[in-house]
Image (cartoon, rainbow, N blue to C red):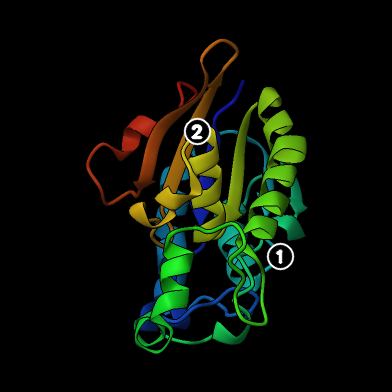
């Protein structure tokens, strides 16, 4: 099977200011565009067979930059791999929410399945829609070659936790930065194997994520 590359979109003004952006369609800022271009140059040698992209503009633009000049790649936008809907908390700063809603934030940190964002999505529903798309659409595509997935931090963490067999309570024990890569190999006997987590072209050892086709 091929290698799966999970890429978080480049930076937006909401990311820079520490604000929650789930369903809010925030574009990349100048730094985010630069981040995507730097990542593109390093990923260029990889022969992607297919790409799955969140329809949010920040992910779409990141994917467009990465895939620019490439041909014969099957691309598909998947609504199921958008970020969680933060509801009334959209656009709010996380640090402010900790002060204003400490008990609810702790429920989120504990990844309680029945926790729902006020006016937004429940964790259980968020996890279910992502894993359904992953198991039925994305994972099968890995059988044909290397797959690119351009999406959001929460989605990448959820898939990573799932593949490593960890509970959702590990969600806040991991971190995914903008325009960084998490990669998995898949073995028929051993199953999913983490190749690298939250790696970037500016970090030592990043070249190790590249398959032999480089």
Determine whether, in the image, residue 26 is placed left or right of residue 94: right
What is the number of the mark on residue 44?
A: none
* Position of residue 15 measured from the top left corner of the image (x, y, whole percent): 42, 76
Instruction: Give the structural element (helix, strand or loop) at label 2.
Output: loop
Residue lying at the far top of the rendered structure: 189
Instruction: Give the structural element (helix, strand or loop) at label 1.
Output: loop
Q: CA distance from mark 1 to mark 2?
A: 28 Å
Q: Which residue is mark 1?
A: 55
Quarter of the image where one finds residue 1: top right
Can the viewer see residue 10 in this picture? no
Q: Residue at x 51, y 26 (%)?
A: 185
Determine whether, in the image, residue 42 is placed left or right of residue 81: left
* Position of residue 4 measured from the top left corner of the image (x, y, whole percent): 56, 35
Q: Examine the rendered structure and indicate whether residue 214 appears above or below residue 155.
A: above
Is the C-beta separation of discs 1 and 2 under 8 Å? no
Q: Residues within 10 Å of mark 2 (few under 14, many from 20)?
A: few
Q: Residue at x 70, y 25 (%)?
A: 144
- State the residue in front, 159 or 106: 106
What is the number of the mark on residue 165?
A: 2
């Amino acid at each position: 099977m091929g290698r799966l590359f999970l890429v978080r979109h480049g930076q937006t003004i909401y990311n820079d200011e520490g604000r929650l952006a789930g369903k809010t369609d925030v574009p990349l800022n100048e730094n985010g565009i630069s981040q995507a271009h730097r990542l593109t140059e390093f990923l260029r040698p990889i022969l992607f067979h297919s790409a799955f992209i969140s329809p949010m503009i920040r992910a779409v633009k990141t994917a467009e930059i990465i895939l620019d000049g490439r041909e014969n790649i099957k691309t598909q936008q998947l609504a199921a791999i958008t970020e969680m809907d933060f509801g009334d908390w959209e656009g709010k700063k996380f640090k402010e929410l900790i002060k204003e809603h400490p008990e609810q934030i702790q429920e989120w940190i504990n990844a309680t399945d029945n926790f729902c964002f006020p006016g937004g999505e429940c964790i259980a529903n968020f996890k279910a829609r992502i894993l359904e798309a992953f198991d039925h659409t994305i994972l099968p595509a890995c059988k044909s070659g290397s797959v690119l997935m351009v999406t959001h931090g929460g989605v990448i963490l959820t898939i990573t936790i799932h593949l490593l067999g960890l509970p959702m309570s590990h969600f806040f024990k991991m971190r995914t930065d903008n325009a960084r890569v998490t990669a998995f190999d898949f073995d028929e006997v051993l199953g999913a194997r983490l190749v690298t987590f939250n790696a970037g072209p500016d970090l030592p050892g990043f070249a190790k994520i590249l398959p032999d086709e480089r």
